[in-house]
Image: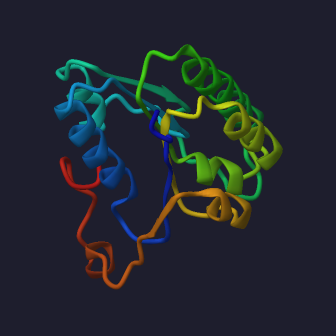
Amino acid sequence: MQKGLLMVYTGNGKGKTTAALGQAIRSLGHGKRVFMLQFMKGSPNYGEVIMSKKLTGFTMEQWGRDEFVHPKQPEQIDIDWAQRGLLRANEVIQSGEYQLIILDELNVALGFGLVFWEQVEELLNTKPKILDLIITGRYAPPALLKRADLVSVIDEHRHHYQSGVEAREGIEY
């Protein structure tokens, strides 16, 4: 029996969700089933949401609004979405239906106080031993980094936003 990996993609650079999706594609290529739950995202216009409907073996759910969440003063509705998303993540993790689960932007939900480390720790403690799990987002807490089997910190050295280039379909969303 293989040990499932805990992989964390974090840092201030662009590409954490993209890296997780790349891993999903690789897993799908080997016939594995993949589930992706996005915290704090609710727009149906993200390329990965559109793509998810076209891939066999890939399931995606969004647990957030298509609204900006204030980092220091989140609204109750955003806390409620994240809390329900974490419950859903636990259901899926315990279901045994998937070989890879991606919890996209969970680190941001932690950093904004929408969910708490103790809740995530409980989820990690009860996850099946063979399940591969990816957690993405800025602000990964040190305790998560310590537990992870793989940590990729994506740094920003330059971003086209800085030269006035707007977000583009197929690049940022």
Q: Is residue 165 left or right of residue 75?
A: left
Q: Nearer the viewer, residue 45 or 114?
A: 114
Q: Report the number of numbered marks.
A: 0
Q: Residue at left 66%, top 33%?
A: 82
- In-image side of 136 versus 35 (left or right): right
Is residue 34 or residue 167 the one in the foreground?
34
90 left or right of 13? right
Closer to the camera in the image, 52 or 145 = 145
Q: Horizontal placement of 54 versus 44: left or right?
A: left
Query: Is residue 153 at least partly visible in the picture?
Result: yes
Vertical placement of residue 123 versus 153, above or below: above
Task: State which quadrant residue 92 falls in.
Answer: top right
Q: Which residue is more in the foreground, 135 or 167?
A: 135
Q: Is residue 66 visible?
A: no
State the scheme by which the image is colored.
rainbow
Horizontal and vertical percent position of residue 62? 47, 28
Residue 85 picture location, percent across and down:
62, 27
Q: State the residue at coordinates (50%, 33%).
A: 131
Which residue is pictured at 67% across the width and 64% down the height? 146
Considering only vertical position in the picture, is 155 above or below 169? below
Residue at coordinates 75% horizontally, 44% vertically from top-left? Answer: 121
Q: Quadrant of residue 98?
A: top left
In this view, the residue farthest toward the right is 118
Percent x, y of residue 104 = 48, 43
Looking at the image, is 18 positioned above or below residue 88? below
Q: Residue furthest bottom?
A: 157
